[in-house]
Amino acid sequence: MKKKSITLLLAGAVLTTALTGCGANGKTSAEAGAEISAEGTDPSGSGASADTGNAETTADTDNAPDADTAKDTSGSSYKVGIVQYVDDASLNQIVAAIQTELDKKSEELGIAFDYKNYTYNGQADATTMNQIATDLIASDVDLIIPVATPVAMVMQNATAENARDDGSLIPVVFSAVSDPVGAGLVASMDAPGSNITGTSDALNTEAVFDLMLAADPDIKTVGLLYDKSQDSSTAAIAAAKTYCEEKGLAVVEKTGTNNGEISLAADALLSSGAEAVFTPTDNNVMTAELAIYEKFIDAKVPHYGGADSFALNGAFMGYGVNYVELGTATADMAVEILANGKDPSALAVQTMDNGIATVNTETAEAIGLDYSMFADKCSSLVEIQTAEEFN
């Protein structure tokens, strides 16, 4: 398996409007020293059910250790593995925020969090992700942060099967897992169990469709575009179908697992008469957005995505959480486990407030769709123009 090294460029304190991606490539620990470039701009951006409404960040107070039992970790050093599923805007944005927060906590607490030698990209390849897991376990890292559902499942399975010499399991703190319970990663959101916890970017699917109908109440047919192999899409697509059935909307459903298939699926949706298209927090469609957004513009069909990076890459609108906040919260949970001795099995999964609409103004103008009503229906409305990465 060919692996390429990555270099880590830490963006300072970043606030973004959407999922953003950059070029991080998978590597082994022997090829350490790496750079993931990811900068954001403003908030936006995949719980037990992927359609959980506007769940607010879970305050973590119950699991705080007593002052007399907290570990004195000043001067300590911890090896932290960071593994993102694939190179796309959102996941790179999350990784950059995790790294920035770990650096900040390192300075505040006098603790070294070494992630530079243990940052990887799984390239959406099962073989690569399993090899990364093997490398991290062999390197005896103190904690693993997988970003996105597929890689979280690989890391959880690998750590569960490879107990350390003392019988303990390497803690896993995932980020951007849309449906942790449905994916089988945790027993419940409040009490995850085993050696795992993390943050969820669960999508409020109903809110996206409410915006869709607010912008065009005359829609009769909705297209669903997603990768059926992505666990993050399952609950959101089910919720979308339920919504459409209740509203009397016809549904056209097309799927793909790579850029070529997704492009063909987009063509099929348009030829089937879809008047608007919805994609949940789907990393594979996200990576294809730059190649398909002009198809929707030419057909005057708005594409609604489950993260702000969809809008950055040309879709009409992206809806969701602030991925910088998600990455920061993930890093903070990792620090609580390593520096403060918290038990991941009892540390509740955190969900972010879900209500930021990011609109691509160039696309809105090209398709002639008014979105001014969104401002009164969301916690925040962000305007953006087409670009590959956030500046």
Image (cartoon, grey):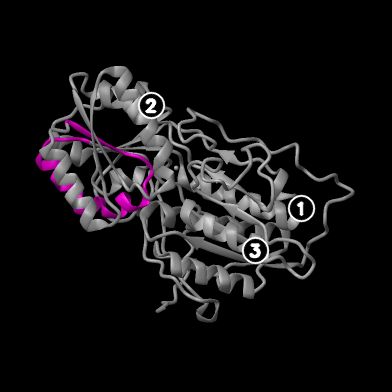
Q: Which residues are magenta?
A: 275-302
Indicate whether 215 appears above or below 259. Answer: above
Mark 2 or mark 3, earlier in chain = 3
Residue matched to label 1: 340
Identify which residue is drawn at 56% across, 52% down: 174
Q: Nearer the viewer, mark 2 or mark 3?
A: 3
User: Is disc 1 in contact with disc 3, using a CB cutoff of under 8 Å?
Assistant: no
Q: Check residue 207 in the rendering and tell me which mark sits there, or answer none.
A: 2
Report the Cα–Cα distance between label 1 and label 2. Answer: 37 Å
Name the element at disc 1: helix
The answer to whether residue 94 is visible is yes
Q: Residue at x 41, y 40 (%)?
A: 234
**How far is mark 2 from mark 3, CA to CA?**
40 Å
x, y percent for residue 162? 66, 66
Identify the element where label 2 is drawn. helix
List the single residue furthest toward the bottom.
30
Mark 1 Cα shell of 10 Å, populated few (<14), some (14-19), many (≥20):
some
* Residue 22: quarter of image: bottom left
Asked whether disc 2 touches disc 3, contact meaning CB atoms under 8 Å apart, the reply is no
Q: Earlier in the sequence, mark 1 or mark 3?
A: 3
Q: Which residue is mark 3?
A: 161
The label on residue 163 is none
Residue drawn at point x = 72 percent, y = 43 percent: 346
The label nearer to you, 1 versus 3, is 3
Question: In the picture, which quadrant includes the N terminus?
Answer: bottom left
The tag earlier along the polypeptide, 1 or 2, is: 2
Q: Residue at x 24, y 48 (%)?
A: 386
Among the 4 quarters of the image, the one containing residue 253: top left
In the rendered image, the vertical position of residue 90 relative to residue 115, given as above or below? above
Inter-mark Cα distance, 1 to 3: 25 Å
Label 2 environment density (alpha carbons within 10 Å; few <14, some 14–19, many ≥20): some
Q: Amino acid at mark 2?
A: Ala
